[in-house]
Image: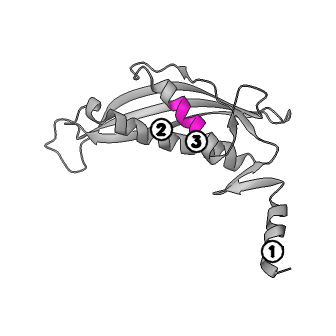
Amino acid sequence: MPKFSVFLILAVLSLTGCYTLSGISIPASVEKAYVPLFIENALGAPPTLYIDMTEALRNKVRDEARLEITEDDPDIEMKGTLVDFSVSAEGASPGDQTAAFAKLNRLTIVVAIEYKNLRDENDEGWKQNFSNFYDFPATTTLASIQDEAIEEITEQINEKIFNKAFAEDW
């Protein structure tokens, strides 16, 4: 038997207990996740943002953790609440004493996640807020950059959630 074939067989056999993907390690016994629709609790947020954020997290878990998203007998559960959607003015640039108004606006989104490993009675899970922001010129309207900003913020928040759920706990 060629050396390469032996190596390949050994590699496959060593991966049967868990799999690792980009530094993420998930036990083979974890196959299904439940990600219910986020609760919408942020005043001023676009009406479908909580739905869009739920779907984005589901897609990330499905695609990158390779878990089936289901309500039936899940192994893990990730409940979310859209906590904040706000725009704030950021201060003038350092050394700019002539600026009467802020130079930037900042869109911030905050979600609260409650994570539970339903297969481990000793695992208490965790609850944590995750946030990110998007800065844009004060002369630009939120409406003109909102879709791009939300997409970027959602991607960053989901990366943080995913890493907390799958890089730290296993």
Q: CA distance from mark 1 to mark 3?
A: 33 Å
Q: Classify mark 3: helix, strand or loop.
A: helix
Q: CA distance from mark 1 to mark 2?
A: 43 Å
- At horizontal 48% and vertical 29% (from top left) the residue drawn is 52
**In the image, 8: left or right of 115?**
right
- At horizontal 85% and vertical 35% (from top left) the residue drawn is 122
Kindly report which numbered mark, 2 or 3, lies closer to the viewer in this rendering.
3
Q: CA distance from mark 2 to mark 3?
A: 11 Å
Precedes in sequence: disc 2 or disc 3: 3
Kindly report which numbered mark, 1 or 3, lies closer to the viewer in this rendering.
1
Highlighted magenta segment, given as a residue range: 53-60
Q: Residue furthest left?
A: 98
By secondary structure, the bulk of the magenta-drawn segment is best described as helix
Residue 34, given in percent of the width and then of the height, sits at 69, 30
Q: Is residue 30 above or below residue 34?
A: below
Residue 87, given in percent of the width and then of the height, sits at 34, 30
Q: Classify mark 1: helix, strand or loop.
A: helix
- At horizontal 76% and vertical 26% (from top left) the residue drawn is 72
Q: What type is the residue that disc 1 sits on?
A: Ser
Precedes in sequence: disc 1 or disc 2: 1
Q: Where is mark 2, residue-wise?
A: 154
Q: Where is mark 3, residue-wise?
A: 60
Q: Classify mark 2: helix, strand or loop.
A: helix
Q: Is residue 168 above or below residue 151?
A: below
Q: Quadrant of residue 6?
A: bottom right
Question: Is 63 within the magenta?
Answer: no
Q: Where is mark 1, residue-wise?
A: 5
For the image shown, how many numbered marks are present on the structure? Answer: 3
